Amino acid sequence: MIKLSSKIEGQHYQLYKLEQLLKPLGYSIGGGWEYDHGYFDYKIDDEVGYQYLRIPFQSIDGQLDSRGATVQLGKPFLLSHKYQIGVDDYASAGAMSGTFNQFQEPQDPDATVSEEYVHTGQELVKELENVLATN
């Protein structure tokens, strides 16, 4: 994980409006959200794992699933997960096995982020700062 400095850190937005601004740019709300916090994720790449720019947010007024919820943005960071190699070679095709083995654990959940992705992440943060500053 690599944290990236940004002018958006600490800024407040209505969650609905933030979603309307970020989704067209390619961001989605990550699956690990709770009622009081969550993440906007931008998939940078998915070769031999996946690399994301992640924008954390925390509810400051209302639960995230309630109308008019306001959130505060946290410090953006890059996240890299490297998949296990060869896991699918041993997977069974049975219905019961598929129920338990459909998701593989990452080989390295905090893999090194290459310099290429750091640069891309910094550019994405600049774009995000510009979009949010004008709205």
Image: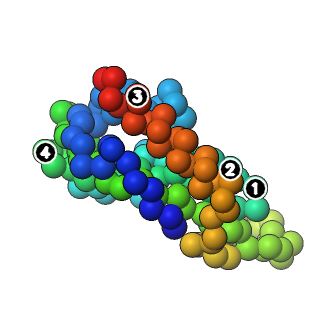
Which of pointers 3 and 4 indicates the residue nearer the eye?
3
Q: Amino acid at mark 4?
A: Asp
Nearest to the eye among marks 2 and 3: give it.
Answer: 3
Of labels 3 and 4, earlier in sequence is: 4
Q: Which residue is mark 2?
A: 45
Q: Give the CA distance from mark 4 to mark 2.
A: 34 Å
Q: Say whether marks 3 and 4 touch (CB < 8 Å).
A: no
- Vertical side of 81 occupied by 74: above or below: above
Q: Is residue 41 above or below residue 32?
A: above
Which numbered marker is on residue 114?
none
Q: Residue furthest left?
A: 61
Question: Mark 4–mark 2 contact, CB under 8 Å?
Answer: no
**Residue ID at (63%, 64%):** 113
* Label pair 4/1, CB-CB below 8 angstroms: no
Q: CA distance from mark 2 to mark 1?
A: 6 Å
Q: Does residue 86 lie above or below 23 as drawn?
A: below
Cα–Cα gap, marks 3 and 4: 23 Å
| N-term mark: 4 or 1 | 1
Residue bearing the label numbered 4: 61
**Kind of residue indicated by mark 2:** Asp
Place of residue 124 in the rendered image (x, y in percent of width and height, measured from the top left):
53, 41
Q: Residue 35: where, in percent of width, then height? A: 25, 53
Left or right, 102 with respect to 42, comes to right
Q: Who comes first in sequence, dot 4 or dot 2?
A: 2
Q: Secondary structure at mark 2?
A: strand
Disc 3 to disc 1, C-alpha distance: 28 Å
- Give the labeled residue for mark 1: 47
Identify the residue position indicated by label 3 in the image.
131
